[in-house]
Image (cartoon, rainbow, N blue to C red):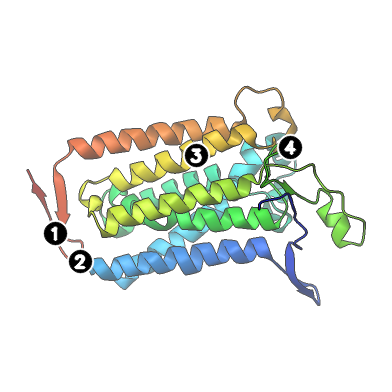
Amino acid sequence: MLGVVTWTVDPILFEAGGIRLGWYGILFAVGLIVFGAGIIAKMWKHEGLTEKSYNQLVLYVLIATIVGARLGHCLFYEPEYYLANPLEILKTWEGGLASHGGVIGIMIAIWIYSKKVSHQSMLWTFDRLCVPVGLVAAMIRLGNLMNHEIYGHATDVPWAFRFIENVHLWRAGAEPIFSAPSHPTQLYEAGMYLITFAVCSWLYWKKGAQKHEGFIFGVAMVMIFVSRFLIEFVKNDQVDFEAGMTLNMGQWLSVPFILLGIAAIIYSLKQPVKVYQRGGNSIYEKK
């Protein structure tokens, strides 16, 4: 039988000699480097694409994700502080990453990658990149769970969590101050992202949906950001200025990606089917 969970996991897995290893960083790295890059490597091998193009794609995406997510948090959620203290932007170890900024960063990186490396359309790359993206996003949300952050409103649902509100002081020896039983929105999002991963994997490996250029990308954008939009209704505000807003910042930032996803799906279904020969160089269209 379900009951309220008192969440007392230490966000730091290991700390000694000035070295600190946190769950969030571990899960972020495992998601990006092990799962994300590993699945893309399997896809590249399946399609006979070059190792060089794979290595460059991984490098572009890793840099874009970290830089975009950090700048997204600083400029979307706390612009006045960070514009007045620009060197603080570099302190990524203090936390503060925004998924919407990460997506924008990746889009810019893929535009460059498409021009300089793949010489394919951006949608060609996005269709493949979006296959593991749900799994990567789920790992990041589990990192938020371990950090006792980005949780939801107080609730009486039987699966509610009580999170430690004074994590830093608690780790320094203070008594924990627990939140009221709250929605574990990190798990809600992680669950939806895992479903997105399952759907996109099925579309790629079983249905060959990459022949409809832009379709997998569109499905991923719609599933990820519609779920994000809806879950935000039960999530606590991240910054003070969101108080009283009908839609919070996360929801407003999700709307363009939802519309982009719908547009990509419609576009893909109107275009001729593209079939790529092994190696990705020769393309012919089936009318």
Residue 113 in sight: no
- Left or right of 132 in this view: 160: right
Q: Are marks 2 and 1 in contact (CB under 8 Å)?
A: yes
Secondary structure under badge 1?
loop
Residue 3 in sight: yes
Q: Position of residue 174 (x, y in %)?
A: 92, 57
Q: Are marks 3 and 2 in contact (CB under 8 Å)?
A: no
Q: Nearer the viewer, mark 4 or mark 2?
A: 4
- Identity, as a three-letter code, of the amino acid under mark 3: Ser
Q: Earlier in the sequence, mark 3 or mark 2?
A: 3
- Identity, as a three-letter code, of the amino acid under mark 1: Ser
Residue matched to label 4: 154
Which residue, as the protein is rendered here, is positioned at the far right? 174
- Left or right of 62 in this view: 127: left
Q: Position of residue 4 (x, y in %)?
A: 73, 49
Q: Nearer the viewer, mark 3 or mark 1?
A: 3
Give the class, few, some or many, for how many residues have Cα within 10 Å of label 3's Cα (few <14, many ≥20). Answer: some
Secondary structure under badge 3?
helix
Q: Quadrant of residue 13?
A: bottom right
